[in-house]
Image (cartoon, rainbow, N blue to C red):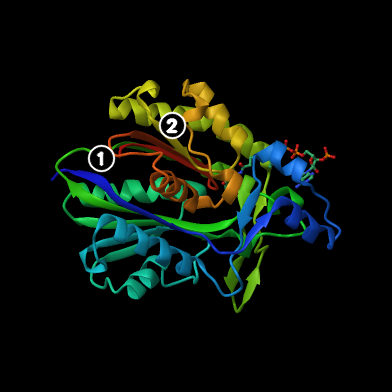
Amino acid sequence: PSFSRISGTGSALPTRRISNDELAADLAKRGVETSDEWIVARTGIRFRHFADPGTTSVDLGEQAARRALDAAGLSASDIGLIIVATSTPDMIFPSNAALIQGRLGAAGGAAFDVQAVCAGFVYALTVADQFVRSGMARHALVIGAEVFSHILDFNDRTTCVLFGDGAGAVVLSASETPGLLASALHADGRQSSILCTPGRVSGGAITGSPFLKMDGQAVFKQAVHVLEDVAREALAKAGREPADVDWMVPHQANIRIMTHTARKLGIPTDKIVVTVDQHGNTSAASIPLALDVAVRAGQIRRGDTLLFEAVGGGLTWGASVVDY
Ligand code: ACO
């Protein structure tokens, strides 16, 4: 087999679901003012899930992985590679991938994390595709798992209303027929300061802020520009046109960025899988989470052509074209 295909999907959300009104009421107690109207108009977000204290990205990632394995009809011992895309790992080390591998009972294969923030899933999928196509692994688990609530500053209304927690996973399997057709990945490290969580553990203390900081307008401007370009690049590599896309499954950061990108590509907005209203921005988890929701709802079907695209801190950005 010289191709990789998505053989199963899974996802997991914390049970605690918070509406904009509930969040606004909580923030008001700290003297932070926001509203459902502001959040919906600027972002499209209506709900997000927050992990209960003690629940981590490994917990959510493990659940999503088990569901993806079930959907693929595989067991943990079939998995030769686990890649977790996360910016909110449980520990500095070992990686979330190693921790999840241990819990699944999939010891023996390779396991590591990929750190490309909101573009992390597209990065991780692209790396896993190289492993599968080259014969290094027959079945790979690619997981996006995040608890951004752990790095949100609830005194900063410009960021804390935007993000949520969750995980999504796919199993990528060796295949005789093409599945992942092409990817394009990019980064511009000169723009690291517009979206970052700069704190570091050093000498037994955290130096620098452990909270997410974002220049929202700067990110917005970059996002709409790079996403169109990288989507066109991946489609061209795949030998496809925007008109061939059955479902666009974008990183779910902001409905305005998602619809703007679709319009620039000439993809009808009713072909966008939208979960940002229900989940907020779950960073590296958002694409596999949206994919799993759409697959289980019967929206995405076998044979559909999918376009994934994402931009995140780094800056990093990427796109993949997939025959599902
Ligand atoms: N509630 C109420 N008012 C608010 C809030 C809030 N939660 N946040 C900001 N405001 C106020 C601001 O203080 C400002 O008030 P002022 O005019 O009195 O100064 C006003 O609203 C407008 O603020 P802007 O920052 O100009 O709002 P903008 O229209 O740019 O929307 C947003 C902000 C939603 C963050 C937008 O810039 C955006 O979506 N940027 C992209 C961010 C993004 O998608 N990041 C994720 C991509 S990468 C990743 O996923 C990690």
The image position of residue 25, as x and y in percent, is 80, 58
**Residue 77 located left or right of residue 312:** left
For disc 1, the marked residue is 179
Circle 2 sits on which residue? 230
Q: Is residue 187 visible?
A: no
Precedes in sequence: disc 2 or disc 1: 1
- Farthest right residue in view: 31
Q: Can you say whether 113 is above or below 159 in the image? A: below
Q: Nearer the viewer, residue 219 or 305?
A: 305
Q: Residues within 10 Å of mark 1 (few under 14, many from 20)?
A: many
Which residue is at a point 58% across and 73% down the rendered structure image? 202
Q: Nearer the viewer, residue 187 or 176?
A: 176
**In this orientation, which residue lies closer to the viewer: 218 or 320?**
320
CA distance separating discs 2 and 1: 19 Å
Place of residue 204 in the rendered image (x, y in percent of width and height, measured from the top left): 60, 79
Residue placed furthest toward the bottom:
204
In what element is the residue under mark 2? helix
* Mark 1 residue type: Gly
In the rendered structure, the answer to whether residue 85 lies left or right of residue 139 reads: right
Q: Which residue is rendered at x = 58% and y = 34% of the image?
A: 257
Image quarter of residue 247: top left
* Amino acid type of the residue that numbered disc 2 sits on in the rendered structure: Val
